[in-house]
Structure formats: C-alpha cells, structure tokens
Image: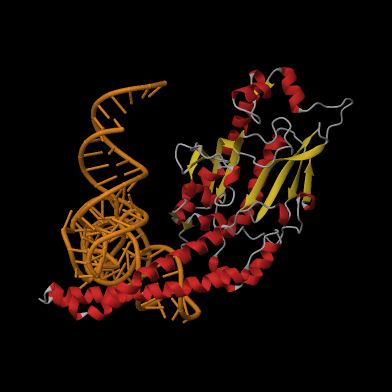
Amino acid sequence: MLDVKLVRQDPQAVAAQLARRGFEFDVAAFEALDAQRKAADVESQNLQAERKSAARKVGELIQGGMAVDEAKQAVNETLEKIASQIDAATSSARALSEQMDELMLGVPNIPAQAVPEGQSEEDNQELLRWGDIPVFDFSPRDHVDLGEGLGGLDFETAGKITGSRFAVLSGDVARLHRALINFMLDIHLQQHGYTELNVPYIVNADSLRGTGQLPKFEEDLFKLRHDADYYLIPTAEVPVTNMVRDRILEADEMGEGLRYVAHTPCFRSEAGSYGKDTRGMIRQHQFEKVELVQLVRPQDSEAALENLTGHAEAVLQALELPYRKVILCGGDLGFSARTTYDLEVWLPAQDTYREISSCSNMGDYQARRMQARWRNPE
RNA sequence: GGAGAGGUGGCCGAGUGGUCGAAGGCGCUCCCCUGCUAAGGGAGUAUACGUUAAUAGCGUAUCGAGGGUUCGAAUCCCUCCCUCUCCGCCA
C-alpha cells in the first residue's frame, strides 16, 4: 500500500498521480476518515494511559499494605470513568483504523514519472525491437494447428478431464515444455545470479493481500474449499515475495539485494475474459511460469527493474525469438506496479507481437502491505 | 485422526496476577583501559502508531493470533495457528 504519511501530507497530489492510471482517489473521504481515526485513537490512548496509572496506583497501595477493596476505593472515580468509556473508545478506534486499512488496501500503486499517459494498451510505448521478423513463402500455422497436427497438444481431452482452458501436452511437446523450464532456470541460476526456490502452490489470504491480489481481485483466483483461507497461486510472485512478509532483514542478509527464481504452475480463473485472446494455450486456467523476483534496497529498485528485464530478454535472445519491449501506460498498469515493461514476442501466425513476459517495479508498495523491511545501517 | 510437550526481544533463557517492554547471558554498537593478542570496565542495543523540526523526548500498543476474566494479564480461562515427540491412517 501507499505510505499513509505521504497521502496525509498531500492527498491532492496523490490523487493526481493515481488519476494517471485511471484510479479515482476520494480525497474528502480519506481526510474525513483519517480525522475520525485520529480523534478516536487519541481518545482511546488517553483513556488507556489513565487506566494504566490508576491500576498502578492500586498496585502501589496494595504493596503499601492497604486492602484490595480499599485501594480500589481510593481511585474509584477514575476507575468508574474509565470503565464506562474505555470499551467504546478502543473498539471505535480499532474499527476506524481497520476501515482506513481497507481503504488503503484498495488503492493501487502510484505510477512512476516515466510511465506514459494513456488509457489502454493502445497507449503503451515501444522502447525497442530485437531480432529479425522471419519472412515465410507460406502462411505460418499457429501453435494450435502445429501442436494438434503433431499429436502433442490436446485441448479436447483436457476438456473432458477438467473443462475448457486446459491442455494436455504429450510426447515431444511435453518434453519441449519441460526443457524450456530447465533452460530458463539454468540461465538465471548460472548467468544471472538467482537462487532457485521451490515453493508452495497453495497460499493463504495474508500472502495474497501482501502482493496485492486481495482484497480487490479475489474473482481472478481459485479458492480451495478445504480451507476458507487457501488459494491456488496465480503466480510464483505470491509465495516468493511473501517469504519476507513480517520480516526485518538485517543489512548483511539483504546485501546488494536478493534474487530468486522459481518455476511453478500458475492458476487463474480468468473470470470475465471469455472470448478474448483465448485460442489455444493463451489464457489458460493453468500454465507454467519461471518467475524472477528481486528484493532490493529502495535506492536500487529502478536499476533492478532494468537488469531483471534484461534477464528475461536474455532468454528470448538465446531462443532467437524476435521481440519488442514496451513500457505500459498508466491505464494498463497492474495494481501493485509503478513501472512495467512488457516483452512481446513475435507470433508469425498472428503477424503481431504478443506479451510473453511482464516485468514490474513495485517500489515499496508490496513491502508496505506485507511489512517487509530491512535495517538500514545508516 | 489420537496422546503429550512447547511457542517470551537478533539468539539463548528467567518470569504463574501488580509499577514488566520484560532479569540474566550471548551477540552487536560506542566509549574507557591495556605497548600485540586475549582479558577487563562502562554505556547502549525491538517494532508500530500518535505528538514533534527530530531517527530527541513523551504517550499508547505489542511476550504465536484472537477473544474473555480482572482495577490491573507474559502470567488465569476459551478458541485458533504453528513447532516438536509418540501412536494410528493414507500415499
């Protein structure tokens, strides 16, 4: 979430920044709630302070030899006053603080300065192109035609086993799929200095709140019936990033930053996306991803996004896949991101570039949500 | 699934109703002492929120989480979570 101090300081400026991504921040509502919250907090703290000193007084009197009832009688006035007020004051302070949390959890990250203005992916800006687009003297088939033709890709059977938006891979196609996973993991381990992780594919609600999927995007997730609090991961970003939730990293542990790579399946309900970009293996309910996560010091985050994007590009280059790099405009930016580069790979059958990789700098947004900190030696 | 033990500060570990945010030790930081090293002495060493110019003070909260009893809870009661040991079951 955003730094609430920053929001208090200049809510209008925050609202203006958020408007760049098409989010309407209600300044008046925020200020009203914050004022209420603060007043309730002060009242409840004052009452608690009174109770504390009164209880201490009772204790002193008892130690001094006075009977318990007598001691209570001696501070009776304060005790009565507190008894009648403290419950209401503390529960109201808590309720208001929870309301404020809810409000702040629903506010997306502020776009970075460099993020272009715009409403939709139409307004994303191309930064570079890599590779030569292949020219064929025939009309290229897409992965569905090729895969089904080779007998290695079977959507119908997957439909029987489960339902739509799943695939069965078999034979060489399955093997190629596995090979790509290892290939990417090895590049990132051996050349880019990442540590490999194998993480749970099921996470709790706290983790999803930490990375920003909850509370606003529950409909995109698969929730397990087994436990009210368990969900299938929509990306390895959730388990990997949440490793540091509620932690304070020491400076030596943090070092120059932590780099993790994890391969996991990802599960997404893709609610509301029916009919859009759904041919073949695009937008499946289940897909595999090799995820890169860097946890870095604040001053290093811009550079980390650049080098992480380079690491993703290295994979496409090694595979000799033509691609382009675009920076997402404000309106296309994900909830938790302040800057996002999409890598779009050339799809010959579609005669266009399509997103294959998405690299984001979250700034301190997720760190604040999950109370992940580091001890700055300075 | 059954039975038992346990969760306290960076770590270890006291504390079973009273001035405890918490003894002591270790670690770490700073200072002193010491002609190397080692040893020794002193001070300090959590986080959040509020107040504030302040990372100074002061107030409040936090001893796995939540709820309860009480004037007062780390300490008593209830629920949950997690860890460990043993048994059972399943793969």
Is any atom of residue A131 visible in this view?
Answer: no
Q: Nearer the viewer, residue A283 or A344?
A: A283
Q: Position of residue A305 (x, y in %)?
A: 64, 51
B70 horizontally vs A27: left or right: left
Q: Is residue A248 above or below residue A228?
A: below
Give me the residue at 55% from left, 72% from top: A32
Farthest left residue in view: A65
Q: Position of residue A106 (x, y in %)?
A: 58, 57
Quadrant location, the N terminus of chain A: bottom right
Q: Position of residue A119 (x, y in %)?
A: 76, 55
Is any atom of residue A296 visible in this view?
Answer: yes
| Colour mode of the rendering | secondary structure
Q: Position of residue A337 (x, y in %)?
A: 63, 54
Q: Quadrant of residue A140?
A: top right
Q: Quadrant of residue A353?
A: top right
Give me the residue at 64% from left, 50% from top: A360
Q: Nearer the viewer, residue A235 or A134?
A: A235
Q: Nearer the viewer, residue A34 or A363?
A: A34
Farthest right residue in view: A137
Q: Is residue A90 above or below residue A350?
A: below
Q: Quadrant of residue B4?
A: top left
Q: Is residue B73 above or below residue A273?
A: below
